[in-house]
Amino acid sequence: MQHFEVNYDGLVGPTHNYAGLSFGNVASLANAKASSSPKEAALQGLRKMKSLHDMGMKQGVLAPQARPDIDALRRLGFSGSEGEVLHQAATQAPAIFQAVCSASSMWTANAATVSPSADTDNGKVHFTPANLTNKFHRSLEPQTSGRILQAMFNNSRYFEHHQHLPDNEHFGDEGAANHTRLCREYGHAGVEIFVFGRHAFDSSKPAPTRYPARQTLEASQAIARLHGLDSDTTVFLQQNPAVIDQGVFHNDVIAVGNQNVLFYHQQAFADTQNKLDEIKQKFGDSPLHFIEVATDDVSVEDAVKSYLFNTQLITPPDGKMTLIAPTECQENPAVNTYLEQLVASDGPIQRVNFFDVKQSMRNGGGPACLRLRVALNDEELAAANPNCLMSEALFARLNQWVEKHYRDRLAVDELRDPALLEESRTALDELTQILKLGSVYAFQRA
Ligand code: SUG
């Protein structure tokens, strides 16, 4: 049996914009109100997907969500026709209105936590959509994320889907952005590492003081229970509160793992040595590489600016472990020097490929934010929706689709244009036919 890591990238939605919605995410606040290019954003994402496909990786596409979210506005008391709802919200509550227009579902590392069948007690692949309670605009995502994932992995013999955790800060869950898995081979049982920011039920424990900790220990523990993980191969690790306060709002901004490599910053974790020892002990006898980047080589500030750790660490079929990095890493002198040395060293990371995903980066979303990893064996892959897998034909089709439906520029005050709602729905309705997802959007089910 063969095993793969499939990267499902979020397709950027037609309302991609910069609204400064994410307190604690430095890039989101710095670029608030800049005008965006939804078309360029979507094309940048597609180019990254196609390149990974061309490298021989299994690459998938995850559909964006429908925005503006009219149902959310109705729940908040805006009423009348859809045009009236949009108009009232945009004029009476512009901040709320901008939040319901966000294309934030593009960052599919936050769509769900996924445990491969080799790790779970019933031998199925488990999915739990993230509730994303910490940010209002993101808390609108889990239900539709769940529906889309069910349409993509629609076979109960292989796949088990859970409801997202209770919508409350005590169980704040940000999905795979705070979860990484180490293993010898993708098909072997691995060590699942859950990284949390704070203890929800024990306020005496250390926590950040400036910016929010979005993920709680209790949420991570609940996911491990739901997925039937073995405590002998599960590790709960606290993020260093001091780095959250420096803008590291998810673990994938400061650490990334793949197979037997954990690549992380010296300041990433609390209680680092004990936790690394625990990971080593749970991983077992085979070789395990901890690549720690020292503060003297790359400061936390440079890591946050360049997204050195929001790289995808992948193993293409040629076996050369590769970092998929944003071009910001090349542009940052300290990070570029570090990466040159890393590749020249005799370590497991042998190649770095740079990608321009600047449209997403300006909202704090790098290459790793844009993808949800799903490790599958060949039977599971055959049971997954084949229309969501990248190919020459799908790449050409999606490029045409973007060119046809997406705007070149979008300013925040253009979000209220009723035509944008129609454009977005027309585009997404067509997309569900291309990806054969069925009626996953509320506007299709009404
Ligand atoms: O949740 N940005 C996202 C970025 C998510 C990045 N994901 C990972 N690290 N995995 C967030 O903060 C900004 C939207 C705006 O400001 O318009 C935003 O939602």
Image (cartoon, rainbow, N blue to C red):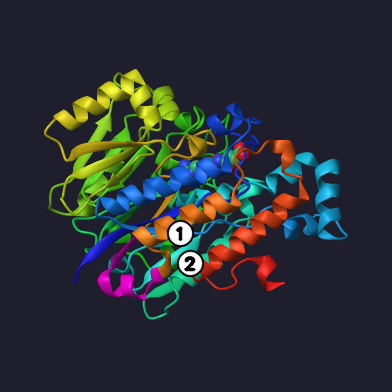
Quarter occupied by the N terminus: bottom left
| In front of the other: 190 or 150 | 150
Q: Is residue 379 magenta?
A: yes
Number of residue marks: 2
Q: Is residue 86 left or right of residue 430?
A: right
- Between marks 1 and 2, how big is the CA–CA gap? 10 Å
Q: Does the closest atom of ligand 1 sit within 8 Å of the Cβ of label 2? A: no
Q: Is residue 255 left or right of residue 183?
A: right
Quarter occupied by the C terminus: bottom right
For disc 2, the marked residue is 435
Give the residue drawn at x 58%, y 29%: 210
Type of amino acid at the residue the image marks with label 1: Arg
Q: Is residue 285 left or right of residue 274?
A: left
Q: Quadrant of residue 327?
A: top left
Q: What residue span does the magenta drawing correspond to?
A: 374-386
Type of amino acid at the residue the image marks with label 2: Leu
| In front of the other: 92 or 25 | 92
| In front of the other: 124 or 282 | 124
The image quadrant in which ligand 1 is located: top right
For disc 1, the marked residue is 397
Q: Position of residue 91 (x, y in %)?
A: 85, 42
| Dot 1 crowding, Cα within 10 Å, few <14, some 14–19, many 20+ | some
Q: Position of residue 101 (x, y in %)?
A: 68, 48
Give the residue drawn at x 52%, y 70%: 437
Q: Earlier in the sequence, mark 1 or mark 2?
A: 1
Give the residue drawn at x 38%, y 81%: 157
Q: Position of residue 269 (x, y in %)?
A: 37, 36
Q: Is residue 210 magenta?
A: no
